[in-house]
Image (spheres, rainbow, N blue to C red):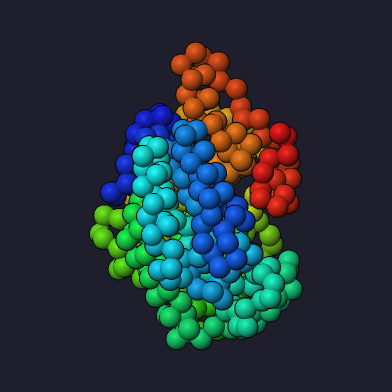
Amino acid sequence: MAEGVFETWEIGSMRARNRLIRAATFDGLATSDGCPTDAMLARYEALARGGAGVVITGYAYVRPDGVAYPHMISACDDSFAATWRSFVERMHELGARIVLQIVYCGSGCKADPLPARILGPSALPHPKTGVVAAEATPAELRELARAFGDAARRACAAGFDSVEIHAAHGYLISQFLNPLFNRRSDEYGGSSENRARFAVEVVRAVRASVPRDYPVLVKINSSDGVDGGMTEPEALQVARFLADAGASAIDVSGAWRLACVADHAGEPLFADFARRLVREVDVAVLLTGGCRSLAPLERLAREGIAGFGLCRPLICEPDLPNRWRAQRAEGRVTPSRCIFCDRCSVTRDHTCVLG
């Protein structure tokens, strides 16, 4: 059973100083070929100094054809290994654990120019980008699962404390889980189990590429939030499949752009689903989305949620964990200054517009 937000906690070999997690956030601060820059490293150092227990990087593509945006970080070869090792060492010096999120974006790609061939579950246009992916063959999917495993191996070798597989938010793995994207009739389509097959193969490939106690996190949607998409009961089933395949933790997210913070009585957006998931799986459950006040997080920690992902609140206030800790000792904790306007997502380097 989890305890207070500011208690230390462990997943496998990763031990963190508190349960506040900087959720994976695209920064757009890498070089054009995916190398971390001094500006990116400075941002992560600020998060570590600000008191976050765990920092999850913005998503890193596992193959060049899996990029989503310009200036994404790369995990597809060893070109930047020395840079990453130095970065990880610095984060550890500042007391934070560091996790590399890995992804293949698929038809959610907004790169210019587009990769010559983008894989997807079915050859359908993406509703936001209009990109039509090529329906991946089973052999291509097995090769791609190996690419995830290779990226995880590189992360482990560079000293990252964990990896997180991005299986949410409409990117490739999430598309396989979503019946609106996945119209296949082979072993990768149809039933929930079949639609989860690629996700399970990715988890197994990653687990086989790292030590047994190395944490493998997986971020999933609690539902797709649209008629015909993956439902919450299906998401619970998917989470069980992933835990059985070797995931160390399930990071719960969802269709946050469709959610209204005011509708959740001050709780994180997907708290009810996370509570149910705690009863369904024997691995850690993390919760990301709408975490802007400390009191509900403390309550959810007592109910078994292992950690809490904060994205926009930490864009707004990188030192929010330190502020909350100090205010907690004084008995007067105030919420994050973040108002969830999401205007940070349209600034060039994803900074808060509140100043």
Which of the image's four quarters has the N terminus? top left
Depth order, front residue of 306/54: 54
Residue situated furthest left in the rendering: 212
* Residue shown at 68% from the left, 68% from the top: 110
Q: Is residue 188 above or below residue 326?
A: below
Which of the image's four quarters has the C terminus? top right
Report which quarter residue 164 is drawn in: bottom left
Give the percent coordinates (x, y) of residue 107: 64, 73
Q: Decide if residue 202 is in sight here.
A: no
Q: Decide if residue 131 is in sight here.
A: yes
Q: Is residue 39 above or below residue 205?
A: above
Q: Is residue 247 left or right of residue 213?
A: right
Give the percent coordinates (x, y) of residue 129: 72, 69
* Residue shown at 47% from the left, 57% from the top: 101
Residue situated furthest top in the rendering: 330
* Residue shown at 64% from the left, 36% from the top: 316
Q: Is residue 342 left or right of residue 103?
A: right
Depth order, front residue of 205/89: 89
Give the percent coordinates (x, y) of residue 269: 60, 42
Q: Is residue 196 left or right of residue 39?
A: left
Report which quarter residue 317 is drawn in: top right
Numbered marks: total: 0
Depth order, front residue of 20/247: 20
* Residue shown at 35% from the left, 58% from the top: 158
Depth order, front residue of 290/240: 290
Give the percent coordinates (x, y) of residue 308: 49, 40
